[in-house]
Amino acid sequence: METTKQLPKTIKLFKFARKEASLHGNYRIGAMPRISEIARNTEDRIKVDLSFYLENDKTPCIKGIINANIILDCQRCLEAFPVDLKVNFNLAFVKYEDQAEGLDSSFEVYVIGEEEDLDSIDLITDEILLSIPMAPSHDFDCSLKIDEEEIVEEIRKNPFDILKNIKMADFGKEK
Ligand SMILES: [Zn+2]
């Protein structure tokens, strides 16, 4: 009966882990500030399933899946670049770094000190951003169109060089 409860705004890490809660979230991309900065489809939704548990009877962990289709800008041609994300993760939260020693390598370890509350949207946003390519660009050659525009841009960036050339030309005329 615990399976389809809604993920609240704030995660109570130890409480949820002790209860082995399974929580579900469904967010509009526009409700996630750091994602909506880079996404074109802010009306589309991101689906999240999180299962909480204690590893070794003491370390709170979250096993989760995020499903999202996010449309980014191609960094080369600036056209739409859709990314279909299915992010699986297994997070462990420790107070100090040395507590991570007993955990196997399948865990992403977060050191949180005395913190027990986590912001749900922040956590999900971090996992999404980790899975998104740093410089998204089409895997075909989409660069041809932009080349000329880039050259024009380059000239605009150096107004002083242009000014220098004009002055030199005037000087040449006077002589
Ligand atoms: Zn492109």
Image: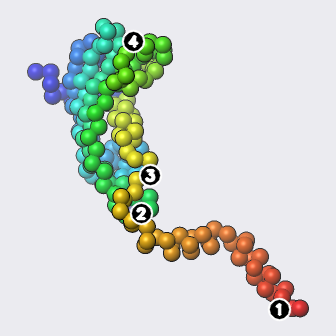
Q: What SS does tag 4 mark?
A: helix
**Is ligand 1 closer than 8 angstroms to the Cβ of mark 4?**
no
The tag earlier along the polypeptide, 3 or 2, is 2
Which residue does the image show at 27% across and 29% down from the upper left?
64
Name the residue beneath numbered marker 4.
102
- Disc 2 marks which amino acid? Leu
Q: Is 90 rendered above or below residue 47? A: above
Q: CA distance from mark 4 to mark 2?
A: 45 Å
Label 3 CA crowd tier, 10 Å (few <14, some 14–19, many 20+): few
Give the percent coordinates (x, y) of residue 31. Answer: 33, 44
Name the residue beneath numbered marker 2.
78
Q: What SS does tag 2 mark?
A: loop
Q: CA distance from mark 3 to mark 2?
A: 11 Å
Q: Is there any visible trace of residue 33 in the rendered image?
A: no
- Disc 3 marks which amino acid? Ala
Q: Is there any visible trace of residue 99 in the rendered image?
A: yes
Q: CA distance from mark 1 to mark 3?
A: 48 Å
Name the residue beneath numbered marker 3.
135
Residue extending furthest toward the left: 1
Q: What SS does tag 1 mark?
A: helix
The tag earlier along the polypeptide, 2 or 1, is 2
